Image (tube, rainbow, N blue to C red):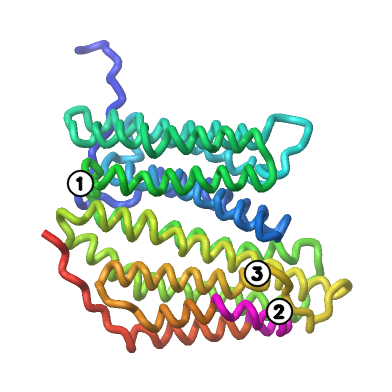
Amino acid sequence: MPGERARPRLTATTDEHRVTPAELFFDLVFVFAITQVTALMAENTSALRMLGAVVVLALLWWCWCCFAWLGNVVRADTGALLGVLVSVMAAVLVVTLAVPQVYSDHDTGFPVPLVFVLCYGAVRVLHLVAYWLSAPGDAELRATIRRAALLSVSPPFVLLLVGAALDGAAQIILWLAAVLVDYGAIYVIGASGWRVTSPAHFAERHGLIVIIALGESLMAIGAGVAGLPLNAPVLVTAAAALLLAVALWRVYFRRVAEAAEHRLTEAREERTGFARDVYTFLHLPLVAGIVLAALGIKKVAHQVADDSHYELSEPLHGIVAWSLTGGVGLFLLGACAILWRTTGRRPTTLLVSGVASVAAGGLVVLLPALVSLVLLSAGTATLALTYRQRNPVVLAPAES
């Protein structure tokens, strides 16, 4: 009626929907989040802290994935969802600010682990509420949302709350349990009700987050040499890190992303399950691998720049040595799993390369840090250039 204020509405997407500027703006928070996870790893490189950092990354990844799915069925740049996105950005920003202290809370200020958990819970609740409002006539989706609230949100949130009251190994173990329950519940809930309206949007959204993660590997160089002189080894480190990032970019976008998007587009009944497996679950190893490799790059850059404390012949030590090659190996194994799920064929070259990269961590402790990075970059670049010719894409037929 005239004079009445129009109710903010959620605008449904179409199969031609693409990523909106609002979603790109939303992703800016995750640029900061990934940087903070790398900083959390670098602050304490013990095995327990590395596990804790991966747990935090998995929680942040889940926040991002929730709204990648929602933005595929409802436009993120119009109506009420834009307001929801801004609210979620605020909550995720607080979560991100809490990351460096989430396992080493200070006596002053707010209890950081509790702040982290409460804001994370707010993000999950906002996601479910927005999804609920997006489908007033979809009984199947609303039933799935109820199951998600009972199985995938509530029990993990309780575990996170209990863990926030503890510290050390107990906190990390409880938070790891929360992640496992949350991720596992998605399979218990099933794929019914969820929708992927625009395969192109969904694939593009995940491709952009991979680019954001690769950008973190380059930002790690600057973090490693901050306050130190610029010398020739630092320039070589920067060139090698850039080559590595380009190689991983090529493996993903010229081989993996094309095949996965094609299969997602062709799929019909299987589309939701395929999107869940390939994008929500199997893209996490890609991002985690890049973050781990970024930690190794950061340490290499620091060592070669700080010539007053390190010799140029100094290798990387401990778990950081493994993170350099192991992170690349995890990325390649994730790419292997995506192609295997997509085509039904085992990508042997990626599988062998991934395993070899993980195992190469034992050699990194014996070689100068810069030499290890240069060899890793050269090997990965060779794989990226030759893999396409040796492994033509053969797509498995989508299930009807």
Q: Please report whichever mark, 2 or 1, sits nearer to the chain's N-terminal start.
A: 1
Q: Count up the numbered dots.
A: 3
Secondary element under disc 2, as helix, strand or loop, is: loop
Secondary element under disc 1, as helix, strand or loop, is: loop
Quarter of the image with the N terminus in it: top left
Q: Dot 2: within a 10 Å radius of its alpha carbon, few (fewer than 14), some, or many (20 or more) residues?
A: some
Residue 122: x percent and y percent? Answer: 48, 31
Q: Is residue 322 above or below residue 49?
A: below
Q: What's the magenta region?
A: 358-373
Can you identify the residue that label 2 sits on?
365
Residue 395: x percent and y percent? Answer: 21, 73
Query: Which amino acid type is marked by label 3?
Result: Gly
Secondary element under disc 3, as helix, strand or loop, is: helix
Can you identify the residue that label 3 sits on?
296
Kindly report the secondary structure that dominates the magenta region of the rendered protein: helix
Foreground residue, 274 or 20? 274
